[in-house]
Image (cartoon, rainbow, N blue to C red):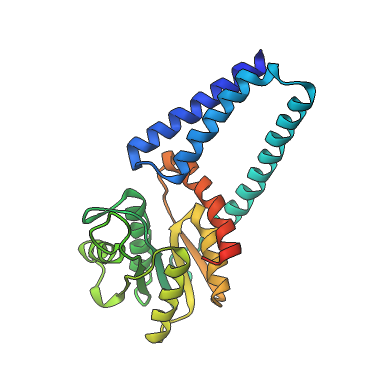
Amino acid sequence: MKRKIVMVILGIICLAYACLTMITVSLQFGNAFFLTLGTMLISEGLIHEKLGNSGKRWMNGIWMISGVLVLILISFMVNAANTHISASQDQGTTVIVLGAKINADQPSLILERRLQAALDYANENPECTVIVTGGQGNGEDYAESTIMKNWLVENGLETNRILEENQARNTGENLKYSLKLLRQNNLSENVVIVTDSFHQLRASILAKQLGIEQISAVNSKTPVLLIPMYTVREWFGLVKALVLQK
């Protein structure tokens, strides 16, 4: 009975979280995962006592293995997030700001936080060049890079310090096309990637696959509410990065 109560409560929490994030940022893979997980937890809690001993052992094993895998993935992502460098550490860098969803002609909250982190770094490192990267996604009226550049200029960054890459549709392309732009303009290959901490591990893996050797990270401040759903999405993104290299 105690297990049933715990599983049902956890399931309700997952469902409530999924609904809250859908209201905040719309339906995405991350909150769809929590919808599914919540449904599974409630279902398992309700039927657990009806399972035979063999069925119970299988269910316990599945939850245990899932928990271990989650802990391993989180440890790797935390390690990548901790590669943050101080803004005054190196003047000879090229900053690559990874795109994210836009809302009409404004950056989403996630993207605005990335842009603020990039702006802070650029202000403290006046010799660096900033590459903003992101194409036009489904349902978007502009390329993400256009909105990103506009935001940086409106907030005081000189236009001649910004290069725009407007074709990329995923993280792999963000880095691939930015690297091409970087080399065309003879910029430093000491690259600083600006994105959310949960995204840094995948970004660094993809950057190394492209031959970028000097990689540092500047992490934006992810809204706390969105961390779980985006972290879950990154778990699957990591698999794609390792297998498909994109």
Above-or-below relation of 23 to 131: above
Above-or-below relation of 219 to 50: below
Q: Position of residue 246 (x, y in %)?
A: 51, 65
Residue at coordinates 57% horizontally, 72% vertically from top-left?
Answer: 208
Residue at coordinates 56% horizontally, 78% vertically from top-left?
Answer: 211
Judge whether residue 82 can be spotted in this image: no
Q: Position of residue 190 (x, y in %)?
A: 49, 76
Near-viewer residue (70 or 78): 70
Left or right of 86, for residue 73 = right
Residue at coordinates 56% horizontally, 62% vertically from top-left?
Answer: 241
Above-or-below relation of 209 to 15: below
If the image is split into quadrants, where does the N terminus sit?
top right
Judge whether residue 237 can be spotted in this image: yes
Q: Position of residue 29 (x, y in %)?
A: 46, 45
Count the labels in the image.
0
Looking at the rendering, which quadrant does residue 209 occupy? bottom right
Looking at the rendering, which quadrant does residue 123 occupy? bottom left
Left or right of 209, for residue 31 = left
Near-viewer residue (102 or 200): 102
Left or right of 61, for residue 183 = left
Left or right of 66, for residue 18 = left
Q: Position of residue 87 (x, y in %)?
A: 43, 65
Looking at the rendering, which quadrant does residue 133 occupy? bottom left
Near-viewer residue (63 or 126): 63
Residue at coordinates 38% horizontally, 32% vertically from top-left?
Answer: 20
Residue found at the very far top of the displayed protein: 1
